[in-house]
Image (cartoon, grey):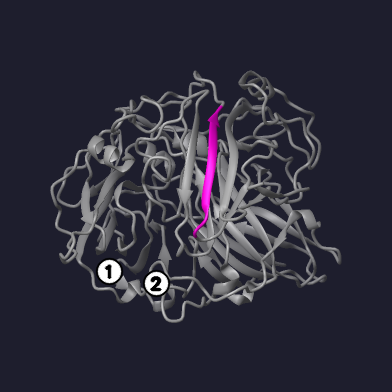
Amino acid sequence: MRVRSHRGVTPERAVPKTGRSIGTFLSAAALLTVSHTGAFAQDVCQRYAQGSTIREPENLYSSNGVLEVNLTYQTVPDDYGIALFCFMNSDGAQSPTLHVRPGDTLIINLTNLVPEGQGKMPAMPEMDMAKAGEGGCGALNMTDASVNMHFHGTNTPPTCHEDEVIHTIVNSNETFRYELHIPKNEPPGLYWYHPHIHGISNTAVQGGATGAIVVEGIENVNPAVAGMAQRILVVRDTLPRNPGHGPRKRPRIAQGGRIVQKEGGWDLLVNYIPIGGPAYVPAVLEMKPGEKQFWRVANTSAITMLDLNLIYDGKQQPLEIIGLDGVPLGSQSGTGQGKSITRTSILMPPASRAEFIVTGPSSEVKNAVLMTRTVDTGPAGDNDPQRPLFTIKTSSAGAKPSDFTRVPAVSGPPLGKRFADLADAKPTGARKLFFSEDDNYLYITVDGKTPKPYAMDDPPAIVTRQGAVEDWVIENRSDEVHEFHIHQIHFLLKARNGTALPPHDQQILDTVNVPYWTGTGPYPNVTLRMDFRGPDVGDFVYHCHILDHEDNGMMAIIRVLPAEQGAATTSKEPAAVEPKQRLAEQKK
């Protein structure tokens, strides 16, 4: 057996099993069960009742260097007619946490069981994807039911059947095999997976089709977490509901060709437990009084920014941060041993991850809650109000053994440093990019070029070479926040608004917040040191990870060409290679 799962983590339910026909799967998608406190509301793309106790997602572990999983992509309407989407394991569990080790192979056999005609494709330019290269990578053209998978934060190749999202399309009733090779020097930490079909990524992710990936070994980098109880906490956002008052219309304001939410706030979920307005009933997390736990939080929301605060009887508690965006702090220089920093709040843009140690409340504490506080996203931004995520309930027994796992004991020294001494590396080039908007589209543009929305057949906006280390300044020229994310690599956050950050705040990330412009003064900006020294070459994308923004054009392609033998690395743009030729070469 290649797959070993941590059982006993989800309630029993009638679910489709391996070997049933596609028709059986689709029939099961329409089954609804009676909702009870702590039970799922339906069998496909399940949701717990509000106020439920947080349960661990199903955990699947690699064995002998391989984790192979059969996932189906499914949909079902909820009680308010809103489409839910999810990846389901062959045993009926949704969005399992995938545990791999550096050097492992992750195989996912993905079958798309979403029927066409769901009516979820917005009006977008250039919505057809052409096959690229001999045989292409999946289907010829996308539909409203198309799916693919992005393995967010992993430093894996942008090639067909690995982490390639530009040309990979899996349509209804089709099966596609992913074979992802985790680098031997991949930092141990928290990553995640989600659909990345341009134009409908926001709908799929807000529908709930997200899950966590854990690259094991963090205890060898930072022994402080060894043996500690760990909680995998996956935060999602969704269209607003108003339980008890019938269907609730999403508050909207139209701007040209796009629709954005301007009032209220998106509902949130923690491990599929809804925290919806107007009451915002929090979930419940169980632990022992004063117990230290390692919380591994992924903000897999499509749109919502989080500002995490742990409050005991009105007082902020310290959060000892061990890792951000999959990289243990302090692990990429010196001995490779991790460090920690302590904060009382953690700002988490969509797609970011934070891993931190908390100390549970004493038995005298009357009210312990993890909340997200109000985030100012700008005049045109979405409303991110203060909301509780979960309350902490203490008892001498603590959580059920099935509701958490433990970090292993230290088993060896840290592995190689993926981003070794990036802060001290000599830049080989520099660029400026900027976010901007108009009434129809949103853009990310290389300074000096004309803004245009992303289209499927775009040539690369940036061409560089493997081995380059570049300093990029990312400006925000709009009146709402944006979140810069790039696939395949990480970067070092060096400065904000031209001012160097203190060394302890210069962290290696894959997603960063760029605040909105007030309309006067300099444009807000961040300075990032981009690391192209790894083995990944080919075409991949960078974009705003507020997915409504990405779907509406705020994305572009970068091409990394192989390093020239015997030549000094430079960021000068060499002759472009056509996309079809590029993918054909990758498939040889």
Our reading of the magenta stretch's main secondary structure is strand
Q: Is residue 111 magenta?
A: yes
Tell me which residue sits at (53%, 44%) in the image: 107
- Residues 586 and 146: in front is 586
What amino acid is at disc 2? Gln
Asked whether, in this view, residue 233 is left or right of residue 461, the answer is: right
- Residues 389 and 31: in front is 31
Query: Circle 1 is placed at which residue position?
Result: 498
What amino acid is at disc 1? Gly
Tell me which residue sits at (42%, 39%) in the image: 548
- Vertical side of 52 occupied by 70: above or below: above
- Find residue 371 and report its horizontal and vertical position in percent: 62, 57
Residue projecting furthest to the bottom: 334
Task: Determine if residue 344 is in view.
Answer: no
Element carrying mark 2: loop
- Find residue 167 and report its horizontal and vertical position in percent: 35, 35
- Vertical side of 114 occupied by 382: above or below: below
Task: Point out the frontmost of discs 1 and 2.
Answer: 2
Asked whether, in this view, residue 547 is left or right of residue 473, the answer is: right
Q: Disc 1 versus disc 2: distance between alpha carbons?
A: 13 Å
Q: Quadrant of residue 319?
A: bottom right
Residue projecting furthest to the right: 396
**Mark on residue 506?**
2
Magenta residues span: 103-112
Q: Earlier in the sequence, mark 1 or mark 2?
A: 1
